[in-house]
Image: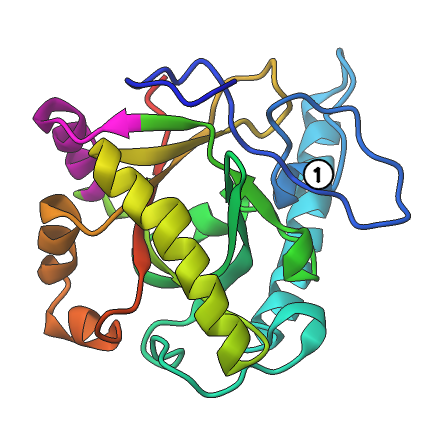
Amino acid sequence: MDLVTGMDYGVQGLILNEPPNQPRANVSSTVQPRSAAASSQPAAGSSRQSYEEEWEQLRQLERISNAGWQQQSNQGPSGMAMQPGPSMSTNSFPVVWQGQLALKNDHALVRMHIISGNQELSRLSLPGFPDPTHNVLKISQRMPLEQAQLHRVSSQMNDTDAHCVLVACATGKSAAEQAHEGDMLRNGFVNYFTGKQAAGIVNVALHGPNSPIQYVIHFFPPCDFSNQALARFGPSVMQAIPEQQPHLFVVITKSWV
């Protein structure tokens, strides 16, 4: 579906690329995030005990995956270490996800630093292949930066357990690649959303396209809303974003649908 205005959360927008040499899953516009992809849903009529056992196995797999991901958080695609360059501090604001953003024909490789909120939401809603180049978030909707919509997001940000705030910056295996991805992020995403006066939207359904939407990922360009939100977390956040570095303010919330 092409980009549409308004908050049409009935259309999912998460597309997850499978690694090469593996059969492609039968998916539509929504793909299960890392926690749901690890196992199938329980068969109809299975007991509650069986469901809970399967869920606990899934959570154990997720914890193992997350432990491995934390070890790679300062590495680039294919396990290569990032070159020093203008980037947010990984000590103050750890990297919780690396992958590609896609919007129409544009794409950019980014790393997401957690700023505040419930980190569990990032683990549940973002794709988690070990190779970041296989993690793709396709933004297929947008939300106008209108007061009513922003108030709804802001209200959820008052509940620590119901949201997760991140900042997405360009990344790469070298200073030159990082600069190139920065241009892609600025031209294809930041400038686009600024011109449209909108935020990008990705809806996440844990159990496939026909299941309820569980999470909504918002991508805001630098604007009054994002600047004010970042200022609430103290001057260290704004100071950590290198001057003139393109970035997106990312808010993951639980769906109200």
Please tell me whether residue 143 is drawn above or below residue 182 in the rendered image.
Answer: above
Figure quadrant of residue 29: top right
153 falls in the magenta region: yes
- Image colouring: rainbow
Circle 1 is placed at which residue position? Answer: 37
Left-right relation of 241 to 20: left
Q: Position of residue 218 (x, y in %)?
A: 34, 38
Q: Give the range drawn in magenta.
A: 143-157
Element assignment for label 1: helix
Please tell me whether residue 70 is drawn above or below residue 251 in the rendered image.
Answer: below
For the point 29% across and 68% down, which residue is it?
245
For the point 24% across and 32% down, which residue is it?
196
Along the line of sight, the residue nearer the viewer: 138 or 203:
138
For the point 79% across and 24% down, which residue is it?
26
Q: Where is residue 229 in the image (x, y as percent from the top left)?
A: 14, 52
Please tell me whether residue 127 is drawn above or below residue 113 in the rendered image.
Answer: above
